[in-house]
Image: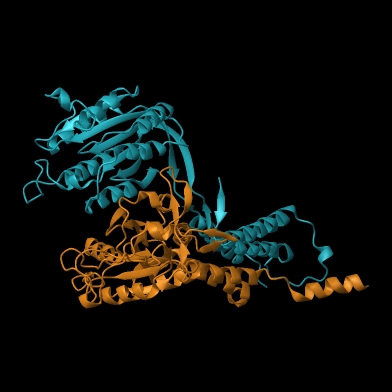
Amino acid sequence: MNLAVNTPWALTGLLLTLLPLFNSGMRSSPAPWSALIPADTLSVFIVCCLRLCAMAAIAGLVLGIAGLHRTEQSRERIGHGAHIVLLLDRSSSMDNTFAGRAPNGSDESKATAARRLLTVFVEQRQTDLIGVAAYSTSPLFVMPLTENKNAVQAAIAATATPALGFTHVSKGLGMAISFFEQQPVTGSRIVLLVSDGAAAIDHDSEQKLRLWFKQQQVRLYWIFLRTAGSPGIFDQPEDSRDDNAQAMPELYLHKFFLGLGSPYQAYEAESPDALKQAIADINRLENLPMHYVERIPKQDLSAACYSVAAFLLLVLLGVKFFEVKR
Amino acid sequence: MKHTLKDYRIGCLLSALIAMLVLFIYPSKQQKMPTYNYTFIIDITRSMNATDYQQDNQAVSRLNFVKQTLRELLQKLPCESKVGLGLFTERRSTLLFEPLEVCSAYTEIDTAISKIDWRMAWAADSNIAKGLLSTLEMLQKSDSSVIFITDGQEAPPVNPNYQADFSTVKSQAKGMIIGVGGLQAVPIPKFDSQGKQTGFYAQDDVPHRSSFGQSNLDPSQIKGYNARNAPFGSEAATGNEHLTALHETYLKKLGAESSLSYARLTDLQNLSRALQNPKLATAKVVQADIRRQPALLALLLLSLVYLPKAYKFRRFFAKECR
């Protein structure tokens, strides 16, 4: 049940419940000698009941005043969903359109498109735990994994502020994976990387990321917002001299992700519509059975206490009119 | 009937019942309560790592002290208040999340504050005036008050010729500048790429003046001055920029220019008093629970009915004595 009160000291008022034990609350009528009155079990019973009623009424009022409530409960349930970390690219180029220009009236920037679609995505994933991390030159911890969708939306909305610096994807990925530490492994674990560029990952980071992806059993979705004219994930180098991570970071990052050994899916979105498709896919695929905790908010019981007390008061008052009047 | 009404007990019970009736009809009252909407912008530049705060007899860094104090403050804010979070470094700040209601999102805000790290900085300069200006411009449209938390240490020190102009944001700016740090200059810890401390910044490690643009001094006073090749002269600048102390006068000046008030962070009470500035509060009408008052009245009246009679006690004690 987990009952609690708001003001514990008010419970000292419960001592008042002892009062009816000392006083029947009835007018005493004069009798020559009380021993003469024959014992009457029914009367004793009724008096006891009335005293109990009075005690309960007092207790009800005191508990109501103390603010009796049931504390927040959590119930474990099994549903479909995932633990998702949104890893958002905050590098300056995200503020340009898919055509690589500064946004004007007709075209929205990549960041705006991503924000709009992610907002819808989060709305659709009601049972998921969603966290948000961002990265530019350094990783930013934004929002821990949470079922509070308002918090996630506030974090996504904050990406409307101007973007920062460069793209340092390996640190961002490390930050995103760290969200899953000390989280139960249930349902699917997803890192949803939304970026418009890539960067070469150094050897040390590569090894660490490989290990962490395996340890934490994370699946990776990469939504690559491709700017027109820039190299894509699936492009093969035309010149063998360009076949290196510095010249084609997107291709090499893709190769690295393929070699991670954990499930990985890449989407190349060249317009807001393609981005929508990628998000719809994830929505459809990632619905593994998952244990999740449903929270039942704190319930106020003082209203019930007051109602009971009021009803008992009514009974006591009613009984008063049946007293013998002399 | 006459007799019945004469009995005080009936009067008491009847009044108690009426009190309960009132309780159910008017369970709450509209009440104005101050609520707040803050966006904390926290300086995460290197100087914030200087350890000049004490906590539990241990020296803690400015940043850790700020984090700890904000987390404690979070518990004190009334429900319906909102808190957003942002970081400052270089010449601008970024917003991590927009203001969230503190009671429903307490854990999320608390975790986010606890995870702030100086390594989140995306660049290593520190120009507070420009940072403050860009923050105020960024949050101009939001109705949140900007709480800019910084120690005022700039790297490199700003040339007075190139100062930020707050005239565009002055009229709408709402918020405070919170100064962090001690007034005694202390060294700034230096970290390696693994995050381990490797000593402190030395005098040669930091720029002691900005060499951007034109010098603010009279050219005839500058040794080795050459308008094109050496506008700042030929001498190497020296100074104490490798040490850091709270630049209170500078922050107060910025506050005056941008019409923000200034307060210094010393402890939680102080901060919470400073932030409860009526200028930053908005009165929100909330339904306050007033069921207690009639319930208390009913309880008193009911207890009166069952109050033990004094003469019974007298008789009881008399028996004992005999």
Q: Position of residue A231 (x, y in %)?
A: 14, 32
Q: Is residue A199 above or below residue A288?
A: below
- Residue, far left: A106
Q: Nearer the viewer, residue A266 or A122?
A: A266
Q: Is residue B72 above or below residue A133?
A: below
Query: Do we see residue A94 in this rendering?
Result: yes
- Residue at 21% in and 37% down: A197
- Residue, far right: B322
Instruction: Please identify which colour was used for chain A in the image.
Output: cyan
Q: Nearer the viewer, residue A156 or A225?
A: A225
- Residue at 78% in and 76% down: B311
Tell me, what colour scheme is on the image? by chain
Q: In the shown orientation, is residue B273 left or right of residue A243?
A: right
**The N terminus of chain B is located in which quarter?**
bottom right
Q: Nearer the viewer, residue A73 or B279?
A: B279
Q: Is residue A308 above or below residue B291?
A: above
Q: In the shown orientation, is residue A121 left or right of residue B105?
A: left
Q: Position of residue A51 (x, y in %)?
A: 67, 59
- Residue at 30% in and 73% down: B254
Instruction: Please identify which colour was used for chain B in the image.
Output: orange
Q: How many marks?
A: 0
Q: Position of residue A95 (x, y in %)?
A: 17, 48
Quarter of the view holding residue B55:
bottom right
- Residue at 47% in and 46% down: B196
Q: Position of residue A73 (x, y in %)?
A: 49, 44
Q: In the shown orientation, is residue A103 left or right of residue A257?
A: left
**The C terminus of chain B is located in which quarter?**
bottom right
Query: Do we see residue B19 in this rendering?
Result: no
